[in-house]
């Protein structure tokens, strides 16, 4: 139904005039006989109000500013009426008032900071229920980076969703790479989170188009370090009188023979262990990072480590992440291992050397690692293929040398 009558009038409420002689300026909207009145939030001296022209008398700066504001009220009301009509609303005076004060959700003007903050707040509620502290920290940090970028480039603390375009994304990407000196893959982590938030805004009809559709970013290939059988044996044989090194080695080996990440070992408790009818002991634990259930039968080495630390205040006394990585770096040097050893190397070693290299199927390894699908595990199989290929190349060179120089 189209409106037949529509009027916007301004007036002052003299009965509410204050001691200084100023009265509030009010707006009255009438549509098809329905009337609604609301305050503009502005005041004017009663003596300076022109009832006929519905504006402030005079040409001083204050009068000009107030009259310009009243014109902006009219413009906004007409704009909101157009938006309501476009979305199929039957426009009433009360509805138009709500739209003016951004109370009609479907036409509310949303900002990037608003929807990103909402995403982070909802994510915070899920901490420990499928969302890890590390994941939430990345979301908080990304929001902080975006704020810093907007302050630097736009001199603003926020931006409307309708203002987002490919230039904003390109600028943010450059800011991460140049100003924050991030590697490509680190910057992509923040860009992907921004893309996720914008997708949520599109899904909620806060905006109609995601500019990321026209912006593609590619991850740089990363060489994943894992220990081969010989290097793993060096760690197993590593003997040290230094307690902190001994404990770091044991925790690392527990990761190598279970595939559990640092945070999953740190949060491991007795309730995560089960014994099946065949007498096998299993770890069944939802991963902190993803919430996916990892199911791992205990290998002898893992059992020995658990038995070694039995009776302590914690099931496994793993050190702080920064400390354990520092100790592992020293252990690698002492063992003559040239690879960059971190605690996460243990998870890669379990997936490659301990399982896949010993003919455990990709599907089984995927379940033990707590991956959501085998595609996430597949790159470990590729690493094994690469390792096999390199060793076979060496073998081929030996035989090639024998062929070139046959025995007389």
Image: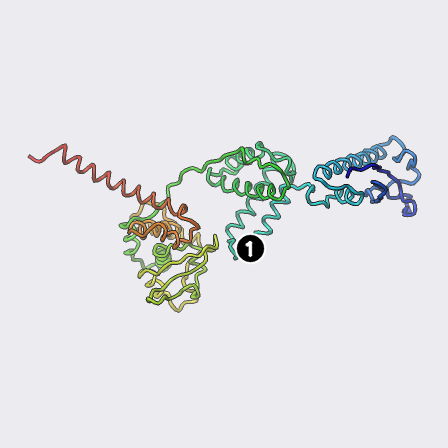
Label 1 element class: loop
x and y percent of residue 354 in the render? 31, 53
Taking the image as shown, residue 102 lies to the left or right of residue 307, namely right
Q: Is residue 14 above or below residue 264?
A: above
Tell which residue pokes out farthest to the bottom in this image. Answer: 311
Percent x, y of residue 326: 40, 51
Which corner quadrant of the image does residue 403 belong to? top left
Quick one: which residue is furthest to the top in this view? Answer: 59
Please state which of residues 185 and 318 is positioned toward the viewer in this rendering: 185
Which image quarter holds the N terminus?
top right
Q: Residue at x 51, y 50 (%)?
A: 135
Query: Can the viewer see residue 47?
Result: yes
Q: Is residue 290 left or right of residue 166?
A: left
Q: Quadrant of the C terminus?
A: top left
Tag 1 residue: 126
In terms of depth relative to the viewer, which is nearer, 405 or 382? 382
Quarter-of-image position of residue 152: top right
* Residue 195 spot, x, y in % from top left: 55, 40
Q: With 356 as the anchor, is 314 left or right in this view?
A: right
Q: Is residue 189 left or right of residue 57?
A: left
Q: Nearer the viewer, residue 205 or 243?
A: 205
């Amino acid at each position: 139904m189209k409106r037949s009558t529509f009027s916007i009038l301004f007036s002052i409420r003299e009965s509410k005039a204050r001691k200084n002689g100023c009265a509030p300026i009010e707006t009255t909207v009438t549509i098809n006989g329905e009337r609604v009145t609301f305050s503009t939030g502005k005041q004017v001296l009663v003596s300076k109000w022109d009832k006929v022209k519905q504006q402030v008398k005079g040409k001083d700066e204050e009068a000009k500013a107030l009259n310009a504001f009243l014109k902006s009220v009219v413009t906004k009301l007409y704009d909101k009426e157009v938006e309501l009509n476009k979305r199929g609303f039957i426009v009433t005076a009360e509805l138009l008032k709500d739209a003016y004060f951004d109370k009609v959700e479907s036409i509310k003007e949303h900002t990037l900071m608003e929807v990103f903050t909402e995403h982070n707040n909802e994510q915070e509620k899920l901490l420990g229920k499928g969302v890890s502290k590390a994941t939430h920290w990345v979301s908080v940090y990304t929001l902080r980076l975006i704020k810093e970028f907007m302050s630097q480039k736009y001199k603003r603390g926020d931006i409307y969703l309708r203002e987002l375009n490919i230039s904003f994304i390109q600028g943010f990407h450059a800011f991460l790479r140049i100003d924050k000196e991030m590697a490509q893959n680190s910057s992509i982590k923040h860009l992907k989170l921004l893309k996720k938030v914008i997708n949520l805004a599109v899904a909620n009809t806060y905006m109609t188009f995601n500019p990321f559709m026209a912006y593609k970013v590619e991850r740089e290939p990363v060489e994943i370090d894992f220990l081969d059988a010989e290097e793993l044996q060096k760690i197993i044989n590593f003997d040290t009188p230094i307690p902190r090194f001994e404990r770091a080695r044991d925790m690392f080996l527990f990761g190598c023979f279970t595939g559990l990440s640092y945070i999953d070992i740190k949060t491991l408790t007795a309730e995560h262990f089960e014994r099946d009818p065949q007498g096998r002991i299993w770890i069944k634990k939802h991963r902190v990072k993803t919430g996916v259930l990892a199911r791992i039968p205990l290998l002898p080495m893992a059992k020995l480590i658990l038995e070694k630390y039995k009776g302590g205040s914690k099931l496994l006394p793993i050190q702080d992440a920064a400390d354990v990585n520092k100790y592992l770096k020293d252990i690698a040097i002492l063992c003559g291992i040239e690879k960059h050893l971190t605690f996460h190397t243990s998870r890669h070693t379990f997936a490659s050397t301990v399982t896949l290299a010993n003919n455990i199927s990709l599907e089984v390894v995927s379940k033990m690692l707590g991956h959501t699908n085998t595609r996430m595990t597949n790159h470990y199989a590729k690493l094994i293929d690469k390792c096999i290929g390199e060793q076979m190349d060496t073998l081929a060179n030996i035989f090639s040398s024998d062929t070139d120089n046959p025995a007389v």
